[in-house]
Image (cartoon, rainbow, N blue to C red):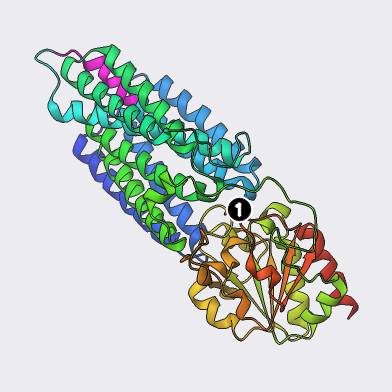
């Protein structure tokens, strides 16, 4: 079955170029909270245009399969996007990214099965594209599933290691590459199966020893892998849209990985092979001391409310604890009350606060926090020195002064928010459990710091009540 109207390949490619321009504009607009929503719509329009024009490509048939796939995928995508909570957005990103890599690997396997062995053998560039897509796409698929499982707590968030693990992974990757070479040379299906199997296992083994703190970097890294696999598949299928779109995803994913590594002062090699970043096991029980015996000062919600109400400037420092507790709306209510009393309220956003870049920005935008109040780390740190009260809501490692002062700390060298430069610090936290890095926060034993223990949302609501009573 074919459509009665088929366009020339040149016309299709021209529309692909227009779709690519929309994708680029959309990605550009995603760089600012003020334009992110429209950027997402522009990029979606570009993708819709690319998919739509593909239906008019010369020689395309079996439209019922294509329509069925689009229908099933659309239902899954819409339902998933509407049901997922903001705190689970990183998991969804990991899952969808893995599906993209898996699709690229399946296309590579299908093309190899269809074309090999061909008369006189396949062209070298086609074979290279097939092998690359199968290898990288499979690694991205299985690795992303492990990242999803760790974030969803289906697997332990801590690094899962065993003796000589890196040696085993190296040998496994070498064997997988050998299978790829053998598949290209002999054009035998058995070697393609070996390649896919080895790559899938390697993807699992690559992500298992990486801790929860580094999952955002891993997801971004695997996202770049998926883009490269899609671009390579575009060369196999001679599809310009896949080449352009895959290249954009690969480039943006690579850039994001580099930027996140810099934000944590970590190299990609250290992320992948350092077994760093054990996710916390839970909220922990409230306590009045760190694990090394340093005492902390507790404060009541009423006393904290008085400090906030009579401050000139308050800086809110949100973290993953705010996201888990869904405390963004209560925080906005507290800010509105303080502003009504003449207090200046701003928000300090660390690049890796939460579980993915922009996580805090999206959560606060959901609560209609004005964009001008959201300060990046470079702008927030000078303001913190002029702040009367820094209100830390669930942020841990990104506020730890050990990153500046303790060369023995695993956080040393990581750019942080200089919360300790504020005149007073109030930390909202469930208990004294460490953050993703698994170490105590030196901020908590600072004499100017007061701890308000409890669920973040409940604690903010108590502060709201306290400010109203002042």
Residue placed furthest toward the left = 120
Q: Which residues are magenta?
A: 107-118
Say if 385 sits above or below 391 in the image: below
Residue in the picture at 46% in, 33% down = 163
Locate the C terminus and report the quarter of the image it occupies. Answer: bottom right
Image location (x, y in percent) of residue 304: 81, 75
Residue, disc 1: 438
- Near-viewer residue (366 or 299): 299
Write the residue at 41% across / 50% down: 270
The residue nearer to you, when weighing 144 against 121, is 144
Horizontal relation, residue 378 to residue 400: left or right:
left
Give the residue displayed 60% in from the left and 47% down from the top.
279
Residue 332 in the image, given as x and y percentages of width and height? 72, 68
Res 346 → quadrant = bottom right
Determine whether 453 is above or below 316 in the image. Answer: above
Q: Position of residue 365 (x, y in %)?
A: 61, 63
Report the residue that reaches farthest toward the front: 293
Does residue 77 lie above or below 366 as drawn? above
Looking at the image, which is closer to me, 238 or 267?
A: 267
State the image quarter where residue 78 is shown: top right
Label 1 secondary element: loop
Query: How many residues crowd mark 1 within 10 Å: few (<14), some (14–19), many (20+)?
Result: some
Q: Is residue 156 magenta?
A: no
Q: Position of residue 72 (x, y in %)?
A: 52, 27
């Amino acid at each position: 079955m074919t459509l009665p109207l088929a366009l020339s390949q040149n016309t299709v490619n021209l529309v692909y170029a227009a779709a690519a321009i929309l994708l680029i504009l959309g990605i550009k607009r995603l760089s600012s909270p003020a334009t992110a929503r429209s950027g997402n719509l522009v990029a979606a329009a570009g993708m819709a245009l690319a998919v739509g024009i593909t239906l008019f490509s010369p020689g395309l048939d079996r439209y019922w399969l294509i329509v069925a796939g689009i229908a099933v995928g659309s239902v899954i995508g819409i339902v998933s996007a509407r049901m997922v909570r903001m705190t689970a957005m990183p998991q969804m990103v990991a899952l969808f990214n893995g599906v993209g890599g898996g699709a690229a690997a399946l296309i590579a396997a299908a093309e190899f099965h269809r074309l090999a062995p061909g008369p006189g053998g396949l062209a070298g560039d086609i074979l290279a594209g097939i092998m690359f897509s199968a290898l990288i796409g499979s690694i991205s698929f299985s690795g992303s599933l492990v990242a999803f499982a760790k974030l969803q707590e289906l697997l332990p968030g801590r690094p899962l290691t065993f003796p000589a693990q890196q040696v085993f992974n190296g040998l496994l990757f070498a064997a997988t590459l050998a299978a790829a070479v053998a598949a290209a040379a002999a054009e035998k299906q058995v070697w393609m199966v070996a390649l896919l199997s080895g790559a899938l296992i390697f993807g699992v083994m690559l992500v298992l020893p990486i801790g929860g703190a580094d999952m955002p970097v891993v997801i971004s890294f695997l996202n770049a892998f998926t883009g490269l696999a899609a671009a390579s598949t575009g060369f196999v299928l001679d599809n310009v849209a896949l080449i352009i779109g895959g290249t954009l995803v690969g480039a943006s994913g690579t850039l994001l990985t580099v930027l996140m590594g810099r934000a944590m002062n970590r190299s990609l090699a250290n992320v992948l092979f350092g077994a760093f970043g054990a996710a916390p096991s839970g909220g922990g029980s409230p306590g009045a001391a760190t694990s090394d015996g340093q005492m902390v000062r507790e404060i009541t919600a009423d006393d904290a409310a008085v400090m906030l109400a009579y401050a000139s400037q308050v800086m809110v420092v949100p973290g993953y604890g705010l996201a888990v507790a869904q405390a963004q709306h209560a925080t906005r209510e507290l800010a509105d009350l303080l502003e009504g009393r003449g207090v200046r309220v701003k928000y300090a956003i660390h690049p890796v606060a939460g579980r993915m870049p922009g996580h805090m920005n999206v959560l606060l935008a959901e609560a209609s926090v004005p964009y001008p109040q959201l300060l990046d780390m470079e702008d927030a740190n000078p303001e913190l020195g002029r702040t009367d009260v820094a209100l830390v809501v669930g942020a841990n490692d990104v506020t730890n002064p050990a990153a500046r002062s303790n060369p023995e700390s695993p956080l040393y060298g990581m750019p942080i928010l200089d919360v300790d430069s504020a005149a007073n610090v109030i930390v909202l936290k469930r208990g004294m459990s460490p953050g993703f890095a698994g170490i105590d926060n030196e901020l908590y034993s600072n004499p100017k710091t007061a701890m308000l223990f409890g669920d973040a949302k409940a604690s903010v609501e108590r502060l709201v009540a306290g400010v109203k009573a002042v």
